[in-house]
Image: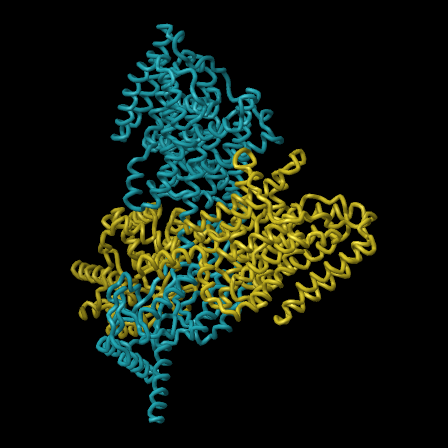
Chain colours: A cyan, B yellow
């Protein structure tokens, strides 16, 4: 082998001696004689070449085994059943039950010291939950009492079935505007008046069903369908829309558009400025300042987490008393009568068949996915802060149960909103008991305290909603995105402006489309590189990025940096052929490429279309009297090449484990050719 | 540096001396003492470590420059304006005109010897074009004369604007069944009778518009949206559907379903077997055998390419004469009166606004894309055989012009069908003149010969269509797909059964969905690998696939084989953390991981979500008192990491150009720690 090695290095040197040294202009010099003698010395001791690292020929794995392996990795990447290993049957049952109802888990470890924190957190959230529940229900276009129902039962259920300690469940601003928007699109003015609420319950039911199925079948990975940038854009846009909607309550406008886009809203607002109610405007102005200051304080000093919820509750109390005393309810809108009592059964209102059921399924799918995405994002954020892990699929199942059951008890879709969960976190909640405490307090409100809201002015609820959502407009995140990744910014801006100028659904569609298109585009135009050798090493690098890398004469080395599949196979083929043409053109007559080495190391997989195109490349190169050489194919790729008989067509002698070994072989062949050509010339002369 | 090197190797040896050698069960031994001394010897001379290959810090490129570069690669990968370089202005104009109308190109090089081949090809295709034109128009549910119009003008236009020599343009079977199916879905029985044809023209108009735009904006790469396997499934399924539709003509059934799925068809066929027409069945039986044999002969011997078209023409002539003489037209359906004369203007029939226009746009989009996909696939196939290249976008523009203009002259959508083009190819066509010759002959037919088809029985047209499409059922391709790539097969079978059991559109949707889902799934679950070193080299390989590769104690090396983007960032993070846990678990107390080296060499890009997750990983590892190390980041990745300030947060000293260098650094730090710990123990003792 040492002789072979010597021969090889001599060959490379010889090849260089034959050609003129040319300077490269498109990055990529050719090895000069001096450099080759240095490479010589390196190669002589380079053990890499001595070891015949064979290209591993894969043994045929059973199809079922391979399928199970891959399915396991796709669906169970977090290996949730790890804890079940090596356990007796009875323990497995208990573990299973604990898995489904995490309350059994934390209840047995509960310490009394936790109670104080959970109590404080629960009470704090409850002071928020009541006004926000009423406010968000109005955003969704639903009766205010539905908002209170949704602030009671879902947190209770979540406390039983959810595993995240920090998520505080209840009506969410984004989902409320989304469901309201979707429902309005599907319910025309000529439909019966109760169909709106009925469709809301039905959509929530199907959302819950869909979520439960998603979680049970471990398809939770599907929620990563929108880039974070697109999410920032979508949520910020939705927040702006919700804020604009509050102008109705703040200015006391009676004829307000049902649409959400900024043009319609501005039209409604400026249609008749005389109709603005100065009373509501004044109340709004005062309390908005008050609430925003309180919120800023809470945000800046975590210890003052209670200030913002307290301010909101105080505002409600003050304005309610004020309206009652001054009889201002004759001039401004108030909440009105809220029925006393807990959640009534609503199963009979759910459409299980008919055209509404179909509409509800579509709406349920959309809100279900956004619900999951929002809640899991919140869960992950807090889990990271506490260095916990969150089992996404388990949470999704919990959410599904919450929504399924809730829809049967007059609740609409609820989620773990970031603002509410942040306060829960800052309040130092220790377990999901905080949710149960919140639910209890809302229950008391429903049973006893609802008459107190009779004179609560709508304007204060609008102010509370405004303050709640204004924090969702993530300017910092958008700026970060712009700084780091311009294409991501496009998704962000597209989603934002789509939501504001078109509609929520349009913005969502834009967000998802740009996100998916980004991926497809990236796969469709993969990175490819021409490689050159770094002298005195056996490293081959992209000649465009490494000025030291120099090309080897007569050998073109191309690395493909992506899997070869139908979406890019044709492009890759044409790219390779274009490089071959360029090298031939550039080099004119003198340096003719004889070997095209394709480095497949980063190519993790190839599909049937990829194989068709590789075969095409082989044929086209053969017609040009070039030899295709493949280097570094992985196991999966080798299997496919084998099954497709491509290895046989190419010839197994043209497969190498690394680029270095391939180059060594090609250069030795070139030398042999040169020698015999010399001998022939000598014989003729 | 040599001292450093010696120190490094001693360190590695020392580290190994400290730990017990453990055998690996999940693939991956640890380096033993003996192996390390060998590695020692290797490292001492390994120049790679001597050279400080710095991680290239990218210089800030101007945004516009980067944007233009990327856009150029996405939209103009084939660099079509290469020929315009270094040309005077007048020549550029001429080249531009030739680019738009390729006829100017080949006309000036035309030799008389080509004429014979083109004439033969043109005549052969014309003998096919007439019966197939009538037959496919009936498949689409359009009047037979429209089929003849579509066999005249489109080939003529294509001869002027198209550049592929081999594509023979005219009505296609797949597009006919597709457009027929889509039109039937959108036109109910209560609509005016001419709306069907009008919608067909309108859809063709919008398809042409869409195609022209696609080609002009160089978005032709979008046609690679269906894998070849899915295409095979879809086209085979559509062929089966077309064959089933011909049972109407073959059995002479009057009440035949308008639906295309196999259940409805079988129901129509078997509803009343007494109503079958024995006459048509007999004619069909005889001529089907005749035509199939002729087709097989043509396929097997390329020189006998004329036999199949000739047989088809002969069948028509014979049956027409037979029906005329025997007055069989009283018992079996015939073509009837075909208006004489060329294509009438049909602009007034096109819906430019209104609900039909909207429907037509949707239909036009679908058929436009399939049209492009089919025609380009055919063009590429033949270009490869002749070692030509095909400018996809130019062809798409030509197709757009053909359909746009054709729709204004009573033509419906036409394409370059594979069977017709194959005959064109076998007949030895030399230029696109063959299309023009075909058009001329069809023109003569329209002007003079249409009365001859009055007594042509429908059954013979059904037989001709049957024989034309049966060859599209690609069993061989489906079997190849099954053998090579099971997931691709899923797409193939899904498309096939979707078309047959549901509808053409459903099958198409399934085909596209599975194709896109495959890509998304692949990106969402990228391959990741734990690396080990191959002894006596500096190569690091996947320990699962290379039994020789052995892990280095205290250092976990993970390679990520895909770009990190929103769809997989969370998965990658969880995967890395799971490996860290596993290594800690597996190794118990003895071998604690201290360094986690993430090999980013295959990671071509990272987006903002990826950066968030990398930051998360860094934080979580820090909490576990592990150090994150990044190796081999590319230029694009470095840019993003820089802009996001991640480099600063990580610390630039933890970025290395290769895994080897990273390992060397980590091992030297480990040794230093061990030394000081020894000294401390000695001091204390």
Q: Please state which of residues B599 and B606 is positioned toward the viewer in this rendering.
A: B606
Extreme residue toward the front, this view = B448
In the image, residue A382 above or below residue B330: above
Q: In the rendered picture of this protein, how many numbered marks are placed on residues?
A: 0
Q: Quadrant of the N terminus of chain A?
A: bottom left
Left or right position of B63 against B503? left
Residue A653 x %, y %: 44, 76
Left or right position of B30 against B104? left
Specify whether residue B74 is in view.
yes
Residue at figure coordinates x 36%, y 56% from the top left: B93
Residue at figure coordinates x 26%, y 78% from the top left: A40
Q: Please state which of residues B190 and A125 is positioned toward the viewer in this rendering.
A: B190
Q: Quadrant of the C terminus of chain A?
A: bottom left
Residue B160 x %, y %: 49, 56
Specify whether residue A58 is in view.
no
Q: Please state which of residues B638 and A401 is positioned toward the viewer in this rendering.
A: B638
In the image, residue A246 above or below residue B66: above
**Residue A22 position by quadrant:** bottom left
Residue A23 x %, y %: 24, 70
Residue A639 x %, y %: 50, 66
Left or right position of B319 against B111? right
Extreme residue toward the top, this view = A326
């Amino acid at each position: 082998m040492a002789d072979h090695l010597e021969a090889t290095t001599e060959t490379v040197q010889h090849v260089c001696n034959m050609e003129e040294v040319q300077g490269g202009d498109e990055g990529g010099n050719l090895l000069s004689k001096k450099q080759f003698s240095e490479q010589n010395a390196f190669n002589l001791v380079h053990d890499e070449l001595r070891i015949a690292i064979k290209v591993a020929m894969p043994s045929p794995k059973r199809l079922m085994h391979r399928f199970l392996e891959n399915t396991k990795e796709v669906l169970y990447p977090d290996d949730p059943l790890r804890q079940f290993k090596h356990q007796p049957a009875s323990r497995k049952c208990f573990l299973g039950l604990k898995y489904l109802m995490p309350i059994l888990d934390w209840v047995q470890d509960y310490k009394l010291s936790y109670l104080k924190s959970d109590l404080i957190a629960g009470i704090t959230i409850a002071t928020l939950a009541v006004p926000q529940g009423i406010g968000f229900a109005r955003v969704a276009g639903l009766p205010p009492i539905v908002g209170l129902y949704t602030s009671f039962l879902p947190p209770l259920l979540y406390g039983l079935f959810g595993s995240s300690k920090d998520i505080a469940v209840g009506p969410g601003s984004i989902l409320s505007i989304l469901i309201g928007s979707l429902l309005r699109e599907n319910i025309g003015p000529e439909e019966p008046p109760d169909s709106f609420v009925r469709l809301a319950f039905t959509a929530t039911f199907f959302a819950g069903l869909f979520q439960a199925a998603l979680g049970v079948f471990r398809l939770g990975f599907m929620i990563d369908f929108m880039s974070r940038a697109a999410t920032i854009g979508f949520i910020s846009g939705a927040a702006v829309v919700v804020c604009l909607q509050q102008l109705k309550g703040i200015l006391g406008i009676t004829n307000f558009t049902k649409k959400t886009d900024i043009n319609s809203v501005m039209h409604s607002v400026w249609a008749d400025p005389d109709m603005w109610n100065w009373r509501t405007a004044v109340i709004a102005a005062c309390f908005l300042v008050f609430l925003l200051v309180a919120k800023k304080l809470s945000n800046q000093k975590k210890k003052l987490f209670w200030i913002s919820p307290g301010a909101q509750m105080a505002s409600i109390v003050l304005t309610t008393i004020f309206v009652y005393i001054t009889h201002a309810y004759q001039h401004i809108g108030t909440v009105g009568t809220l029925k006393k009592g807990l959640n009534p059964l609503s199963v009979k209102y759910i459409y299980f068949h008919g055209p509404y059921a179909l509409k509800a399924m579509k709406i349920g799918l959309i809100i279900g996915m956004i619900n999951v995405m929002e809640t899991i994002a919140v869960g992950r954020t807090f889990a990271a802060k506490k260095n916990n892990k969150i089992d996404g699929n388990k949470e999704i199942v919990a959410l599904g149960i919450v929504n399924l059951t809730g829809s049967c008890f007059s609740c609409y879709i609820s989620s773990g909103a970031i603002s509410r969960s942040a306060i829960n976190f800052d309040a130092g909640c220790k377990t999901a008991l905080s949710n149960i405490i919140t639910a209890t307090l809302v229950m008391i409100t429903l049973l006893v305290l609802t008459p107190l809201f009779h004179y609560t002015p709508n304007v204060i609820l609008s102010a509370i909603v405004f303050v709640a959502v204004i924090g969702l407009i993530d300017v910092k995140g958008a700026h970060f995105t712009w700084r780091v990744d311009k294409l991501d910014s496009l998704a962000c801006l597209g989603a934002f402006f789509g939501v504001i100028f078109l509609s929520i659904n349009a913005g969502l569609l834009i967000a998802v489309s740009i996100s998916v298109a980004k991926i497809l585009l990236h796969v469709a135009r993969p990175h490819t590189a021409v490689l050159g050798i770094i002298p005195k090493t056996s490293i081959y690098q992209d000649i465009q990025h490494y000025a030291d890398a120099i090309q080897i004469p007569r050998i073109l080395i191309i690395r493909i940096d992506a899997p070869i599949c139908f979406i890019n196979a044709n492009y890759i083929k044409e790219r390779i052929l274009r490089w071959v043409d360029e090298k031939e053109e550039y080099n004119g007559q003198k340096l003719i490429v004889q070997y095209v080495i394709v480095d497949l190391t980063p190519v993790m997989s190839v599909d049937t279309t990829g194989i068709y195109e590789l075969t095409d490349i082989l044929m086209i190169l053969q017609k040009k009297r070039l030899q295709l050489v493949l280097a570094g194919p992985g196991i999966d790729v080798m299997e496919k090449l084998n099954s497709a008989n491509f290895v046989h067509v190419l010839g197994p002698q043209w497969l190498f484990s690394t680029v270095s070994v391939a180059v060594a072989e090609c250069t030795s062949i070139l030398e042999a050719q040169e020698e015999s050509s010399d001998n022939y010339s000598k014989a003729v002369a």
